Image: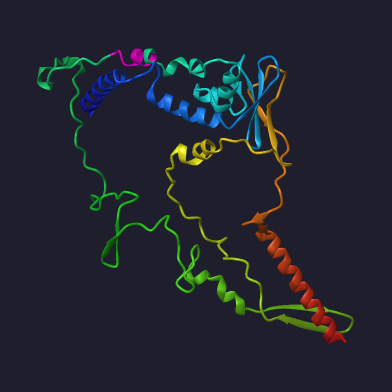
Amino acid sequence: MLEEIRVKVMEMLANNEEKLRSWNGHFSPQCLRLYNDYRVVAQGCVVIFDGDYGYEIAEGEDTHTVNLDSKRCTCRLWELSGIPCPHAIKALTHKKVEPLTEINWFYSREAYLRTYRHKLFPVRGQKFWKIDHSQYMEPQKIMKLVGRPKVKRNREPDEARKRKGEWSASRKGLPVTCNKCGELNHNARRCYKDNFTEKASQQRKGKGCSQTQSQSSLFAYGPEVENEEDPLLRPMVVSETQTWLEPRKTNHVAPVARANTRKIQFRGDHIGASNPTNLPYSPIKCTWKGKEAMTLSQLQEEGRKKIIKSMGSKGKGALA
């Protein structure tokens, strides 16, 4: 195993050094690809200059502050990656400075050459190795263990198992389907559609009399899954450009700020600190497809109010 690792590392160092010869620019291709995407996003930003080193960059409904003296931005992409973020690129362009010169030195060709200049030299075969007798290691003695020897081997967690005479993969992490209604996330034993026919009774005690009222039907608000264990879902592998960078690249024009616009600034003096903070942000009314909507808790509360109201009206009619 050690010989395989040595050969793999030796080939990796040689291949990485060979890739450096195909670079067209001074920085790595991955760095330049991300830098070009940031420049596209920077086209839709609006810059406000304070006259010194501070800039206020508006991107859609968010506003970030950039300090060119300390090379910081409240989005923290510039500090974490070493590549100027879209807000920093917009500020540097406003100051008539080439943003490409602000990329960190670690992405340069010189840094990569220093990393892969050390090589592993080839060695002869194992029969030519010189081993010192004082460091020679003998194999461990075979000892008989206590008890019967184990017959079955240890299976892997994702290995197929035999059910009812057939081999099948594990169903752990897959969605559960109900056999009665065909919906997901519950089974036939916990199908909430059977609860429509259940009855609820409530007993009230008055002055010298007692009444029993029953409710013919109950409101069903969703499947009862509190006793079931959450399935272990497989993590989704989504590229970074498909999640947050692609939508920002298509937004070339900054929209007009609304009432719920938030502004992110540094906490500290005018120079700026490393911890950004968010000002209070209140979202607009809850909507779904352009229409007014309500949450599940609000829907349950409305259902309880209707049940209490109907039970009260029936009680008054019985007393009259």
The majority secondary structure of the magenta stretch comes to helix
Q: Give 181 or 142, whichever is nearer the viewer.
A: 181
Q: Residue at x 24, y 21 (%)?
A: 10
Image quadrant occupied by the N terminus: top left
Q: Residue at x 68, y 27 (%)?
A: 265
Percent x, y for residue 238? 44, 42
Tally of numbered discs:
0
Decide: is 118 above or below 295.
Answer: above
Task: Please provide the residue range marked out in magenta.
Answer: 111-118
Left or right of 225? Residue 22 is: left
Q: Give 308 or 279, whichever is nearer the viewer.
A: 279
Left or right of 222? Residue 19 is: left
Decide: is 97 above or below 37.
Answer: above
Decide: is 114 above or below 19.
Answer: above
Q: Residue 167 sits in which quadrant?
A: bottom left
Percent x, y for residue 246? 49, 38
Image quadrant occupied by the C terminus: bottom right
Percent x, y for residue 105? 45, 15
Q: Residue at x 36, y 16 (%)?
A: 112
Percent x, y for residue 149? 23, 49
Coloring scheme used: rainbow
| Residue at far left of view | 127
Indicate whether residue 108 is drawn in magenta: no
Q: Give 164 or 79, whichever is nearer the viewer.
A: 79
Q: Residue 193 sits in which quadrant?
A: bottom right
